[in-house]
Amino acid sequence: MSHAQVWRTHRQYIALAASWSADRWRKESDRRTALRAQRKPLVADARAALQQARAVDPEGVTSLRHRAERELRTAKRRVPDPMWLFATKTATALGVAGYVWLPEVSVRVWVWSAVAVVAAVTALTVWAVVRERDTTGLKPTPEETMLLKRLQPQHWKEHAEQRGLDGTLTGRPKLTEAGIVCAVRLDGKWTPAKLRDAEDHIRALLGARTDLRIQTRAGKQGGWAELILRTRSAADSDDLKWTPERRSLGVDTVTGEQVTVPLGERLLIAGRSGAGKSVASRPLLYDASEGDTNALVIIDLKRVEGRLWDHRARVASTPHEVIDVVDELETEMLERLSVLPKGQDTWTPSRERPRITVVVDEGAEVMSAADKVVYEVETGEGKTRTANRSALPGLESIARMGRAACIDLWWMTQKPTIGDGIPKQIAPQIGISICLAVRTPAEARVVLGEDAQAKGWNADELPVPGVALVRDGQRKPDPVKVRYMDKSVVIALPDRTPWSRDAAPTVEAAGAPVLTLVKNTTGPDEPAADSAVARVLKAIETADEPVRQKDLVGLTGLSKGAVSKSVKTLTVGGMVARSTDGRLTIPRDDSDAAAA
Protein backbone atom coordinates (compact mmCIF):
# COMPACT_ATOMS: atom_id res chain seq x y z
CA MET A 1 0.00 0.00 0.00
CA SER A 2 1.43 3.38 -0.97
CA HIS A 3 1.85 6.36 1.27
CA ALA A 4 -1.01 8.18 -0.52
CA GLN A 5 -3.38 5.26 0.01
CA VAL A 6 -2.49 5.10 3.70
CA TRP A 7 -3.08 8.80 4.09
CA ARG A 8 -6.38 8.58 2.20
CA THR A 9 -7.52 5.72 4.46
CA HIS A 10 -6.56 7.70 7.55
CA ARG A 11 -8.46 10.70 6.29
CA GLN A 12 -11.54 8.53 5.74
CA TYR A 13 -11.34 7.24 9.32
CA ILE A 14 -10.80 10.77 10.62
CA ALA A 15 -13.79 12.04 8.62
CA LEU A 16 -15.94 9.17 9.90
CA ALA A 17 -14.89 9.83 13.49
CA ALA A 18 -15.54 13.55 13.06
CA SER A 19 -18.97 12.87 11.55
CA TRP A 20 -19.85 10.49 14.39
CA SER A 21 -18.60 12.99 16.97
CA ALA A 22 -20.56 15.83 15.37
CA ASP A 23 -23.68 13.68 15.29
CA ARG A 24 -23.28 12.72 18.94
CA TRP A 25 -22.61 16.37 19.81
CA ARG A 26 -25.76 17.47 18.03
CA LYS A 27 -27.92 14.79 19.66
CA GLU A 28 -26.57 15.57 23.13
CA SER A 29 -27.05 19.27 22.52
CA ASP A 30 -30.65 18.73 21.44
CA ARG A 31 -31.28 16.53 24.47
CA ARG A 32 -29.91 19.12 26.85
CA THR A 33 -31.87 21.90 25.16
CA ALA A 34 -35.09 19.92 25.52
CA LEU A 35 -34.36 19.14 29.16
CA ARG A 36 -33.61 22.79 29.91
CA ALA A 37 -36.86 23.88 28.27
CA GLN A 38 -38.74 21.29 30.29
CA ARG A 39 -37.09 21.84 33.67
CA LYS A 40 -36.61 25.61 33.74
CA PRO A 41 -40.32 26.13 34.51
CA LEU A 42 -39.85 23.82 37.51
CA VAL A 43 -37.06 26.11 38.76
CA ALA A 44 -39.36 29.12 38.31
CA ASP A 45 -42.10 27.32 40.25
CA ALA A 46 -39.62 26.44 43.00
CA ARG A 47 -38.47 30.08 43.25
CA ALA A 48 -42.09 31.22 43.50
CA ALA A 49 -42.73 28.62 46.20
CA LEU A 50 -39.63 29.80 48.10
CA GLN A 51 -40.77 33.42 47.96
CA GLN A 52 -44.16 32.39 49.27
CA ALA A 53 -42.53 30.38 52.04
CA ARG A 54 -40.32 33.33 53.01
CA ALA A 55 -43.39 35.54 53.17
CA VAL A 56 -45.17 33.04 55.43
CA ASP A 57 -42.13 32.22 57.56
CA PRO A 58 -39.58 35.09 57.33
CA GLU A 59 -37.62 33.85 60.35
CA GLY A 60 -37.24 30.32 59.08
CA VAL A 61 -38.76 28.79 62.18
CA THR A 62 -40.79 26.04 60.49
CA SER A 63 -39.71 23.46 57.94
CA LEU A 64 -41.76 25.07 55.20
CA ARG A 65 -39.01 27.49 54.17
CA HIS A 66 -36.22 24.91 54.43
CA ARG A 67 -38.15 22.46 52.30
CA ALA A 68 -38.74 25.14 49.68
CA GLU A 69 -35.01 25.99 49.62
CA ARG A 70 -34.12 22.32 49.27
CA GLU A 71 -36.57 21.89 46.40
CA LEU A 72 -35.11 24.93 44.65
CA ARG A 73 -31.59 23.52 44.91
CA THR A 74 -32.79 20.17 43.59
CA ALA A 75 -34.61 21.83 40.69
CA LYS A 76 -31.47 23.81 39.77
CA ARG A 77 -29.31 20.69 39.84
CA ARG A 78 -31.68 18.93 37.49
CA VAL A 79 -31.31 21.64 34.84
CA PRO A 80 -28.35 20.56 32.64
CA ASP A 81 -25.74 23.01 31.32
CA PRO A 82 -25.74 23.91 27.63
CA MET A 83 -23.45 21.72 25.57
CA TRP A 84 -20.86 24.44 25.00
CA LEU A 85 -20.67 25.22 28.74
CA PHE A 86 -20.45 21.51 29.62
CA ALA A 87 -17.60 21.02 27.12
CA THR A 88 -15.78 24.10 28.43
CA LYS A 89 -16.01 22.94 32.03
CA THR A 90 -14.85 19.44 31.07
CA ALA A 91 -11.85 20.71 29.08
CA THR A 92 -10.85 23.07 31.89
CA ALA A 93 -11.06 20.34 34.50
CA LEU A 94 -9.00 17.97 32.37
CA GLY A 95 -6.38 20.66 31.68
CA VAL A 96 -5.96 21.51 35.36
CA ALA A 97 -5.80 17.83 36.33
CA GLY A 98 -3.20 17.15 33.66
CA TYR A 99 -1.06 20.10 34.60
CA VAL A 100 -1.03 19.08 38.27
CA TRP A 101 -0.88 15.31 38.10
CA LEU A 102 0.83 14.30 34.83
CA PRO A 103 4.43 14.95 36.01
CA GLU A 104 3.84 12.67 38.98
CA VAL A 105 2.56 9.70 36.95
CA SER A 106 4.98 6.80 36.24
CA VAL A 107 5.35 5.00 32.92
CA ARG A 108 3.61 1.85 34.22
CA VAL A 109 0.59 3.88 35.27
CA TRP A 110 0.55 5.56 31.86
CA VAL A 111 0.43 2.19 30.09
CA TRP A 112 -2.38 0.77 32.21
CA SER A 113 -4.28 4.05 32.07
CA ALA A 114 -4.15 3.93 28.29
CA VAL A 115 -5.48 0.37 28.34
CA ALA A 116 -8.26 1.35 30.73
CA VAL A 117 -9.22 4.35 28.60
CA VAL A 118 -9.40 2.23 25.45
CA ALA A 119 -11.52 -0.37 27.23
CA ALA A 120 -13.80 2.29 28.66
CA VAL A 121 -14.24 3.97 25.28
CA THR A 122 -15.01 0.61 23.67
CA ALA A 123 -17.54 -0.30 26.35
CA LEU A 124 -19.15 3.14 26.13
CA THR A 125 -19.45 2.82 22.37
CA VAL A 126 -21.04 -0.63 22.60
CA TRP A 127 -23.43 0.60 25.30
CA ALA A 128 -24.44 3.60 23.17
CA VAL A 129 -25.02 1.40 20.12
CA VAL A 130 -27.12 -1.09 22.11
CA ARG A 131 -29.08 1.71 23.73
CA GLU A 132 -29.75 3.42 20.42
CA ARG A 133 -30.79 0.17 18.77
CA ASP A 134 -34.56 -0.13 18.60
CA THR A 135 -35.19 -3.81 19.17
CA THR A 136 -38.94 -3.47 19.72
CA GLY A 137 -39.80 -0.87 17.10
CA LEU A 138 -41.18 1.41 19.83
CA LYS A 139 -40.07 5.00 19.93
CA PRO A 140 -41.58 7.24 22.56
CA THR A 141 -43.55 10.25 21.46
CA PRO A 142 -42.82 13.63 23.08
CA GLU A 143 -45.76 13.03 25.42
CA GLU A 144 -44.49 9.56 26.36
CA THR A 145 -40.98 10.90 26.88
CA MET A 146 -42.30 13.45 29.35
CA LEU A 147 -44.40 10.85 31.18
CA LEU A 148 -41.52 8.36 31.36
CA LYS A 149 -39.31 10.97 32.99
CA ARG A 150 -41.93 12.02 35.50
CA LEU A 151 -42.53 8.37 36.41
CA GLN A 152 -38.90 7.92 37.34
CA PRO A 153 -38.52 7.13 41.07
CA GLN A 154 -36.48 10.29 41.73
CA HIS A 155 -39.05 12.66 40.26
CA TRP A 156 -41.95 10.79 41.88
CA LYS A 157 -40.30 10.83 45.30
CA GLU A 158 -39.66 14.58 45.11
CA HIS A 159 -43.25 15.50 44.24
CA ALA A 160 -45.39 12.72 45.74
CA GLU A 161 -45.83 14.42 49.11
CA GLN A 162 -47.06 17.66 47.52
CA ARG A 163 -49.71 15.71 45.59
CA GLY A 164 -50.94 13.68 48.55
CA LEU A 165 -49.19 10.52 47.38
CA ASP A 166 -46.57 10.21 50.11
CA GLY A 167 -46.02 6.56 50.94
CA THR A 168 -45.91 5.51 47.28
CA LEU A 169 -42.86 5.03 45.07
CA THR A 170 -42.66 4.07 41.42
CA GLY A 171 -40.40 1.47 39.90
CA ARG A 172 -38.73 1.81 36.51
CA PRO A 173 -41.41 2.58 33.89
CA LYS A 174 -41.34 0.83 30.54
CA LEU A 175 -42.94 1.57 27.20
CA THR A 176 -45.06 -1.21 25.69
CA GLU A 177 -47.35 -1.56 22.71
CA ALA A 178 -50.27 -0.79 25.02
CA GLY A 179 -48.74 2.34 26.60
CA ILE A 180 -46.58 2.97 29.64
CA VAL A 181 -46.55 0.40 32.44
CA CYS A 182 -45.04 1.17 35.82
CA ALA A 183 -45.05 -0.70 39.12
CA VAL A 184 -45.85 1.33 42.25
CA ARG A 185 -44.74 0.28 45.72
CA LEU A 186 -47.30 0.94 48.45
CA ASP A 187 -46.74 1.41 52.15
CA GLY A 188 -49.09 0.20 54.89
CA LYS A 189 -51.77 2.86 54.41
CA TRP A 190 -52.12 2.37 50.66
CA THR A 191 -53.99 -0.27 48.65
CA PRO A 192 -54.50 -0.60 44.88
CA ALA A 193 -58.13 0.48 45.33
CA LYS A 194 -57.11 3.60 47.26
CA LEU A 195 -54.48 4.43 44.65
CA ARG A 196 -57.15 4.07 41.97
CA ASP A 197 -59.30 6.61 43.79
CA ALA A 198 -56.33 9.02 43.78
CA GLU A 199 -56.22 9.15 39.97
CA ASP A 200 -56.63 12.94 39.92
CA HIS A 201 -53.54 13.34 42.10
CA ILE A 202 -51.55 11.00 39.84
CA ARG A 203 -52.68 12.91 36.76
CA ALA A 204 -51.61 16.19 38.33
CA LEU A 205 -48.21 14.84 39.39
CA LEU A 206 -47.52 13.53 35.88
CA GLY A 207 -49.02 16.53 34.10
CA ALA A 208 -51.03 14.11 31.95
CA ARG A 209 -53.82 15.32 29.71
CA THR A 210 -57.33 14.92 31.08
CA ASP A 211 -58.52 12.47 28.39
CA LEU A 212 -55.57 10.09 28.87
CA ARG A 213 -56.94 6.83 30.28
CA ILE A 214 -55.11 5.74 33.44
CA GLN A 215 -55.63 2.25 34.84
CA THR A 216 -54.60 1.07 38.28
CA ARG A 217 -54.75 -2.56 39.35
CA ALA A 218 -53.19 -4.90 41.87
CA GLY A 219 -49.58 -5.83 41.28
CA LYS A 220 -48.07 -9.26 40.93
CA GLN A 221 -47.30 -9.38 44.65
CA GLY A 222 -48.64 -7.84 47.84
CA GLY A 223 -47.74 -4.24 48.56
CA TRP A 224 -47.49 -3.34 44.87
CA ALA A 225 -49.83 -1.84 42.32
CA GLU A 226 -49.54 -1.54 38.57
CA LEU A 227 -50.07 1.83 36.88
CA ILE A 228 -50.88 1.80 33.17
CA LEU A 229 -51.07 4.90 30.99
CA ARG A 230 -52.92 4.06 27.78
CA THR A 231 -50.90 6.33 25.48
CA ARG A 232 -51.13 3.81 22.64
CA SER A 233 -52.81 0.54 21.68
CA ALA A 234 -51.45 -2.70 20.28
CA ALA A 235 -54.46 -2.71 17.94
CA ASP A 236 -53.52 0.56 16.26
CA SER A 237 -51.67 -1.17 13.44
CA ASP A 238 -54.48 -3.68 12.78
CA ASP A 239 -57.20 -3.13 10.21
CA LEU A 240 -60.33 -3.52 12.34
CA LYS A 241 -62.74 -3.75 9.42
CA TRP A 242 -64.45 -7.15 9.44
CA THR A 243 -63.98 -9.51 6.52
CA PRO A 244 -64.61 -13.27 6.19
CA GLU A 245 -60.83 -13.69 6.53
CA ARG A 246 -60.74 -11.60 9.73
CA ARG A 247 -63.58 -13.18 11.70
CA SER A 248 -62.43 -12.53 15.24
CA LEU A 249 -64.38 -10.43 17.73
CA GLY A 250 -61.54 -7.92 17.93
CA VAL A 251 -57.91 -7.29 18.83
CA ASP A 252 -56.38 -7.20 22.30
CA THR A 253 -55.06 -3.68 22.82
CA VAL A 254 -52.27 -4.94 25.10
CA THR A 255 -50.96 -8.06 23.38
CA GLY A 256 -52.26 -7.52 19.84
CA GLU A 257 -53.78 -11.02 19.81
CA GLN A 258 -56.97 -11.86 17.93
CA VAL A 259 -59.81 -12.38 20.42
CA THR A 260 -62.40 -15.01 19.54
CA VAL A 261 -65.50 -16.24 21.35
CA PRO A 262 -66.36 -19.90 20.68
CA LEU A 263 -69.87 -21.13 20.01
CA GLY A 264 -71.55 -23.30 22.59
CA GLU A 265 -71.34 -20.82 25.47
CA ARG A 266 -74.05 -18.83 27.21
CA LEU A 267 -73.17 -15.23 26.59
CA LEU A 268 -73.97 -11.81 28.05
CA ILE A 269 -73.30 -8.67 26.00
CA ALA A 270 -73.90 -5.43 27.88
CA GLY A 271 -73.14 -1.75 27.43
CA ARG A 272 -74.83 1.59 27.58
CA SER A 273 -76.51 3.18 24.58
CA GLY A 274 -73.98 4.09 21.92
CA ALA A 275 -71.26 1.81 23.29
CA GLY A 276 -71.43 -0.43 20.22
CA LYS A 277 -73.25 -3.61 21.31
CA SER A 278 -74.80 -4.21 17.90
CA VAL A 279 -71.51 -3.75 16.06
CA ALA A 280 -69.65 -5.92 18.56
CA SER A 281 -72.20 -8.73 18.22
CA ARG A 282 -72.27 -8.89 14.41
CA PRO A 283 -69.08 -10.98 13.98
CA LEU A 284 -70.47 -13.38 16.59
CA LEU A 285 -73.87 -13.55 14.86
CA TYR A 286 -72.11 -14.37 11.61
CA ASP A 287 -70.30 -17.31 13.22
CA ALA A 288 -73.56 -18.49 14.79
CA SER A 289 -75.38 -18.47 11.43
CA GLU A 290 -72.58 -19.84 9.24
CA GLY A 291 -72.26 -23.53 8.41
CA ASP A 292 -74.67 -26.39 7.90
CA THR A 293 -74.70 -27.32 11.60
CA ASN A 294 -75.38 -23.82 12.96
CA ALA A 295 -78.68 -21.95 13.15
CA LEU A 296 -79.48 -18.50 14.49
CA VAL A 297 -82.66 -17.26 16.20
CA ILE A 298 -82.95 -13.55 17.04
CA ILE A 299 -85.52 -12.08 19.42
CA ASP A 300 -85.61 -8.35 18.66
CA LEU A 301 -88.63 -6.33 19.69
CA LYS A 302 -86.96 -3.13 18.48
CA ARG A 303 -87.03 -4.54 14.92
CA VAL A 304 -83.73 -2.91 13.97
CA GLU A 305 -80.85 -5.37 14.24
CA GLY A 306 -83.01 -8.44 13.60
CA ARG A 307 -84.17 -7.00 10.27
CA LEU A 308 -80.55 -7.06 9.02
CA TRP A 309 -80.33 -10.82 9.65
CA ASP A 310 -83.78 -12.01 8.57
CA HIS A 311 -82.29 -13.61 5.42
CA ARG A 312 -80.01 -15.81 7.57
CA ALA A 313 -81.86 -16.21 10.86
CA ARG A 314 -85.32 -16.68 12.27
CA VAL A 315 -86.39 -13.35 13.73
CA ALA A 316 -89.16 -12.79 16.29
CA SER A 317 -90.15 -9.14 16.51
CA THR A 318 -93.58 -9.18 18.23
CA PRO A 319 -94.56 -10.53 21.66
CA HIS A 320 -96.62 -13.43 20.29
CA GLU A 321 -93.83 -14.35 17.84
CA VAL A 322 -91.44 -14.40 20.78
CA ILE A 323 -93.68 -16.79 22.70
CA ASP A 324 -94.13 -19.00 19.64
CA VAL A 325 -90.42 -19.34 18.95
CA VAL A 326 -89.59 -19.87 22.64
CA ASP A 327 -92.20 -22.65 22.80
CA GLU A 328 -90.65 -24.30 19.74
CA LEU A 329 -87.15 -23.99 21.19
CA GLU A 330 -88.21 -25.42 24.53
CA THR A 331 -89.97 -28.32 22.88
CA GLU A 332 -86.94 -28.97 20.70
CA MET A 333 -84.68 -28.84 23.75
CA LEU A 334 -86.79 -31.30 25.72
CA GLU A 335 -87.00 -33.69 22.81
CA ARG A 336 -83.26 -33.63 22.25
CA LEU A 337 -82.61 -34.28 25.93
CA SER A 338 -85.10 -37.14 25.98
CA VAL A 339 -83.35 -38.95 23.11
CA LEU A 340 -79.80 -38.09 24.17
CA PRO A 341 -77.85 -41.39 24.27
CA LYS A 342 -76.86 -42.70 27.63
CA GLY A 343 -73.38 -41.58 28.62
CA GLN A 344 -73.36 -38.61 26.22
CA ASP A 345 -73.21 -35.17 27.84
CA THR A 346 -74.14 -32.91 24.94
CA TRP A 347 -76.07 -33.13 21.71
CA THR A 348 -74.10 -33.60 18.49
CA PRO A 349 -75.20 -30.91 15.97
CA SER A 350 -76.19 -32.11 12.51
CA ARG A 351 -77.71 -30.65 9.37
CA GLU A 352 -81.18 -31.82 10.45
CA ARG A 353 -80.80 -30.67 14.06
CA PRO A 354 -78.12 -27.97 14.19
CA ARG A 355 -76.67 -25.99 17.05
CA ILE A 356 -79.16 -23.19 17.74
CA THR A 357 -77.95 -19.85 19.09
CA VAL A 358 -80.79 -17.80 20.59
CA VAL A 359 -79.95 -14.09 20.72
CA VAL A 360 -82.15 -11.81 22.84
CA ASP A 361 -81.52 -8.23 21.69
CA GLU A 362 -82.31 -5.66 24.38
CA GLY A 363 -83.37 -8.04 27.11
CA ALA A 364 -85.07 -5.35 29.21
CA GLU A 365 -87.64 -4.80 26.46
CA VAL A 366 -88.29 -8.53 26.18
CA MET A 367 -88.74 -8.79 29.96
CA SER A 368 -91.32 -6.00 29.81
CA ALA A 369 -93.24 -6.61 26.57
CA ALA A 370 -93.20 -10.42 26.44
CA ASP A 371 -93.76 -11.00 30.13
CA LYS A 372 -97.56 -11.24 30.12
CA VAL A 373 -99.32 -11.72 26.78
CA VAL A 374 -103.03 -12.46 26.97
CA TYR A 375 -104.44 -15.34 24.87
CA GLU A 376 -107.98 -16.60 24.30
CA VAL A 377 -108.23 -20.35 24.89
CA GLU A 378 -110.88 -22.28 22.95
CA THR A 379 -111.79 -25.47 24.79
CA GLY A 380 -113.58 -27.12 21.86
CA GLU A 381 -117.02 -26.78 23.53
CA GLY A 382 -117.83 -23.37 22.08
CA LYS A 383 -116.42 -21.67 25.13
CA THR A 384 -113.30 -19.52 25.53
CA ARG A 385 -111.19 -18.49 28.45
CA THR A 386 -108.27 -16.11 28.73
CA ALA A 387 -104.78 -17.10 29.84
CA ASN A 388 -101.59 -15.13 30.37
CA ARG A 389 -98.47 -16.36 28.63
CA SER A 390 -94.87 -15.29 29.29
CA ALA A 391 -91.70 -15.96 27.32
CA LEU A 392 -89.42 -15.63 30.35
CA PRO A 393 -89.96 -19.10 31.87
CA GLY A 394 -89.03 -20.68 28.56
CA LEU A 395 -85.94 -18.53 28.16
CA GLU A 396 -84.90 -19.31 31.72
CA SER A 397 -85.35 -23.01 31.04
CA ILE A 398 -83.20 -22.71 27.89
CA ALA A 399 -80.52 -20.89 29.89
CA ARG A 400 -80.45 -23.64 32.50
CA MET A 401 -80.70 -26.76 30.32
CA GLY A 402 -80.12 -25.66 26.74
CA ARG A 403 -76.37 -26.10 26.64
CA ALA A 404 -76.58 -29.91 26.77
CA ALA A 405 -79.05 -29.77 23.86
CA CYS A 406 -76.82 -27.37 21.87
CA ILE A 407 -79.34 -24.54 22.26
CA ASP A 408 -77.37 -21.60 23.61
CA LEU A 409 -78.76 -18.31 24.93
CA TRP A 410 -77.05 -14.96 24.29
CA TRP A 411 -78.49 -12.07 26.26
CA MET A 412 -77.92 -8.43 25.23
CA THR A 413 -78.98 -5.41 27.26
CA GLN A 414 -78.35 -1.71 27.76
CA LYS A 415 -79.32 -1.91 31.41
CA PRO A 416 -77.18 -4.58 33.06
CA THR A 417 -78.94 -4.76 36.41
CA ILE A 418 -80.41 -7.89 37.95
CA GLY A 419 -84.19 -7.95 37.68
CA ASP A 420 -84.39 -5.00 35.26
CA GLY A 421 -82.13 -5.89 32.34
CA ILE A 422 -81.14 -9.46 33.22
CA PRO A 423 -83.52 -12.04 34.77
CA LYS A 424 -82.40 -13.46 38.09
CA GLN A 425 -82.60 -17.03 36.76
CA ILE A 426 -80.48 -16.25 33.68
CA ALA A 427 -77.66 -14.16 35.19
CA PRO A 428 -76.04 -17.06 37.12
CA GLN A 429 -75.99 -19.25 33.99
CA ILE A 430 -73.80 -16.89 31.95
CA GLY A 431 -70.46 -18.39 30.95
CA ILE A 432 -68.82 -15.51 29.06
CA SER A 433 -69.41 -11.79 29.63
CA ILE A 434 -68.65 -9.11 27.03
CA CYS A 435 -68.95 -5.69 28.59
CA LEU A 436 -68.62 -2.47 26.64
CA ALA A 437 -68.71 0.92 28.33
CA VAL A 438 -71.28 1.14 31.15
CA ARG A 439 -72.29 4.10 33.25
CA THR A 440 -71.57 2.95 36.80
CA PRO A 441 -69.23 0.53 38.58
CA ALA A 442 -72.31 -1.27 39.94
CA GLU A 443 -73.37 -2.19 36.40
CA ALA A 444 -69.83 -3.38 35.65
CA ARG A 445 -69.93 -5.65 38.71
CA VAL A 446 -73.23 -7.21 37.58
CA VAL A 447 -71.78 -8.08 34.17
CA LEU A 448 -68.18 -8.95 35.07
CA GLY A 449 -68.53 -10.16 38.67
CA GLU A 450 -68.42 -8.70 42.15
CA ASP A 451 -64.61 -8.81 42.12
CA ALA A 452 -64.44 -6.90 38.84
CA GLN A 453 -63.02 -3.60 40.06
CA ALA A 454 -60.62 -5.16 42.55
CA LYS A 455 -59.06 -7.16 39.71
CA GLY A 456 -58.99 -4.35 37.15
CA TRP A 457 -62.20 -5.01 35.19
CA ASN A 458 -63.23 -1.34 35.06
CA ALA A 459 -65.84 -1.26 32.32
CA ASP A 460 -67.11 2.12 33.51
CA GLU A 461 -63.77 3.63 32.37
CA LEU A 462 -63.83 2.25 28.82
CA PRO A 463 -63.94 4.71 25.90
CA VAL A 464 -67.00 4.84 23.67
CA PRO A 465 -67.58 3.21 21.25
CA GLY A 466 -66.02 -0.07 20.16
CA VAL A 467 -63.91 -1.11 23.18
CA ALA A 468 -64.93 -4.05 25.36
CA LEU A 469 -63.78 -6.28 28.18
CA VAL A 470 -64.18 -10.03 27.66
CA ARG A 471 -64.23 -12.16 30.80
CA ASP A 472 -64.20 -15.88 30.10
CA GLY A 473 -62.11 -17.16 33.00
CA GLN A 474 -58.90 -17.11 30.99
CA ARG A 475 -58.32 -13.57 29.76
CA LYS A 476 -56.78 -10.72 31.71
CA PRO A 477 -58.66 -7.41 32.06
CA ASP A 478 -57.16 -6.07 28.82
CA PRO A 479 -59.45 -3.95 26.61
CA VAL A 480 -60.41 -5.35 23.23
CA LYS A 481 -61.04 -3.21 20.17
CA VAL A 482 -63.97 -4.87 18.42
CA ARG A 483 -64.08 -5.26 14.67
CA TYR A 484 -66.40 -3.08 12.62
CA MET A 485 -68.96 -4.93 10.54
CA ASP A 486 -71.06 -2.53 8.48
CA LYS A 487 -74.79 -2.99 7.96
CA SER A 488 -74.29 -3.27 4.20
CA VAL A 489 -71.90 -6.17 4.79
CA VAL A 490 -74.54 -8.00 6.85
CA ILE A 491 -77.21 -7.45 4.19
CA ALA A 492 -74.88 -8.73 1.47
CA LEU A 493 -74.19 -12.03 3.27
CA PRO A 494 -75.49 -15.15 1.48
CA ASP A 495 -79.04 -16.25 2.32
CA ARG A 496 -79.61 -19.24 4.59
CA THR A 497 -82.80 -21.08 5.44
CA PRO A 498 -83.94 -19.96 8.92
CA TRP A 499 -84.48 -22.65 11.52
CA SER A 500 -88.02 -23.86 12.20
CA ARG A 501 -89.33 -26.86 14.04
CA ASP A 502 -91.35 -28.43 11.23
CA ALA A 503 -91.53 -31.78 13.00
CA ALA A 504 -92.92 -30.39 16.26
CA PRO A 505 -95.54 -32.71 17.79
CA THR A 506 -99.10 -31.55 17.26
CA VAL A 507 -102.40 -32.56 18.87
CA GLU A 508 -105.31 -32.93 16.46
CA ALA A 509 -107.82 -34.71 18.72
CA ALA A 510 -111.24 -33.18 19.24
CA GLY A 511 -111.45 -30.83 22.16
CA ALA A 512 -107.74 -29.89 22.11
CA PRO A 513 -107.28 -26.23 23.02
CA VAL A 514 -106.32 -23.69 20.38
CA LEU A 515 -104.64 -20.50 21.61
CA THR A 516 -105.23 -17.26 19.73
CA LEU A 517 -103.97 -13.78 20.53
CA VAL A 518 -106.47 -11.39 22.10
CA LYS A 519 -107.28 -8.52 19.76
CA ASN A 520 -106.27 -5.78 22.18
CA THR A 521 -102.62 -6.83 21.98
CA THR A 522 -100.26 -5.62 19.31
CA GLY A 523 -99.88 -7.54 16.09
CA PRO A 524 -102.34 -9.48 13.89
CA ASP A 525 -104.52 -12.29 15.22
CA GLU A 526 -102.60 -15.49 14.56
CA PRO A 527 -102.99 -18.99 15.96
CA ALA A 528 -100.33 -20.10 18.42
CA ALA A 529 -100.02 -23.80 19.10
CA ASP A 530 -98.89 -24.76 22.59
CA SER A 531 -98.11 -28.46 22.31
CA ALA A 532 -97.07 -28.91 25.98
CA VAL A 533 -100.29 -27.35 27.36
CA ALA A 534 -102.40 -29.27 24.85
CA ARG A 535 -100.79 -32.59 25.74
CA VAL A 536 -101.27 -32.03 29.47
CA LEU A 537 -104.89 -30.96 29.00
CA LYS A 538 -105.56 -33.99 26.76
CA ALA A 539 -104.06 -36.33 29.37
CA ILE A 540 -106.26 -34.88 32.13
CA GLU A 541 -109.42 -35.02 29.96
CA THR A 542 -108.93 -38.64 28.90
CA ALA A 543 -108.12 -39.87 32.40
CA ASP A 544 -110.86 -41.88 34.09
CA GLU A 545 -110.27 -40.17 37.42
CA PRO A 546 -108.38 -37.12 38.72
CA VAL A 547 -104.64 -37.53 38.13
CA ARG A 548 -101.61 -36.49 40.12
CA GLN A 549 -99.21 -33.99 38.61
CA LYS A 550 -96.25 -36.37 38.81
CA ASP A 551 -98.26 -39.01 36.84
CA LEU A 552 -98.59 -36.54 33.95
CA VAL A 553 -94.86 -36.84 33.27
CA GLY A 554 -95.32 -40.47 32.21
CA LEU A 555 -98.64 -39.86 30.45
CA THR A 556 -97.39 -36.96 28.29
CA GLY A 557 -93.69 -37.76 27.89
CA LEU A 558 -92.80 -34.21 28.94
CA SER A 559 -90.27 -33.15 31.53
CA LYS A 560 -91.29 -32.20 35.06
CA GLY A 561 -90.59 -28.53 34.33
CA ALA A 562 -92.76 -28.51 31.20
CA VAL A 563 -95.59 -30.29 33.00
CA SER A 564 -95.39 -27.88 35.94
CA LYS A 565 -95.56 -24.81 33.70
CA SER A 566 -98.41 -26.26 31.66
CA VAL A 567 -100.42 -27.11 34.78
CA LYS A 568 -99.88 -23.61 36.09
CA THR A 569 -101.11 -22.10 32.82
CA LEU A 570 -104.22 -24.30 32.82
CA THR A 571 -105.09 -23.73 36.47
CA VAL A 572 -104.62 -19.94 36.21
CA GLY A 573 -106.82 -19.93 33.10
CA GLY A 574 -109.51 -21.94 34.89
CA MET A 575 -109.33 -24.88 32.49
CA VAL A 576 -108.09 -27.30 35.16
CA ALA A 577 -109.05 -27.49 38.82
CA ARG A 578 -106.91 -28.84 41.66
CA SER A 579 -108.66 -30.80 44.40
CA THR A 580 -107.78 -30.70 48.08
CA ASP A 581 -105.53 -33.76 47.74
CA GLY A 582 -103.60 -32.11 44.87
CA ARG A 583 -105.13 -34.13 42.02
CA LEU A 584 -106.06 -32.44 38.76
CA THR A 585 -109.38 -32.63 36.93
CA ILE A 586 -111.48 -30.73 34.39
CA PRO A 587 -113.93 -28.43 36.21
CA ARG A 588 -117.65 -28.81 35.40
CA ASP A 589 -120.15 -25.99 34.89
CA ASP A 590 -123.50 -26.02 36.76
CA SER A 591 -125.41 -27.06 33.61
CA ASP A 592 -123.10 -30.01 33.05
CA ALA A 593 -123.48 -31.10 36.69
CA ALA A 594 -127.32 -30.98 36.48
CA ALA A 595 -127.32 -33.06 33.29
CA ALA A 596 -125.10 -35.64 34.96
Image (tube, rainbow, N blue to C red):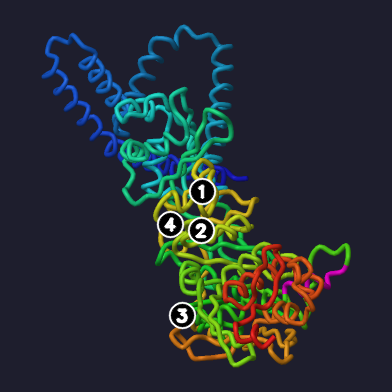
Taking depth in this image into account, of 544 and 60 the one nearest to the observer is 544
Callout 2 crowding tier (Cα within 10 Å): few <14, some 14–19, many ≥20: many
Specify which label sits upstream in the sequence, 3 or 4. 3
Residue 395: % across, % down? 61, 69
Report whether 7 appears left or right of 194.
right
- The residue where tag 2 is placed is 435
Picture disc at residue 438: 4
Q: Residue at x 33, y 40 (%)?
A: 200
Residue type at the position of mark 3: Val
Query: Start and end of the magenta stretch?
Result: 333-341
Closer to the chain start, of discs 3 and 1, is 3
- Residue 337 among magenta residues: yes
Of the pair 297 and 90, the residue shown nearer to us: 297
User: In this figure, which residue is indicated by the disc labeled 3?
Assistant: 304
Q: Are marks 4 and 2 in contact (CB under 8 Å)?
A: yes
Task: Kindly identify the amino acid type of the residue bearing the numbered disc 2.
Answer: Cys
Q: Which residue is mark 1?
A: 457
Residues under labels 3 and 1: Cα distance? 30 Å
Position of residue 415 measured from the top left corner of the image (x, y, whole percent): 44, 61
Type of residue at label 1? Trp
For the residue pair 158 and 466, the one nearer the viewer reads as: 466
Q: How many marks?
A: 4
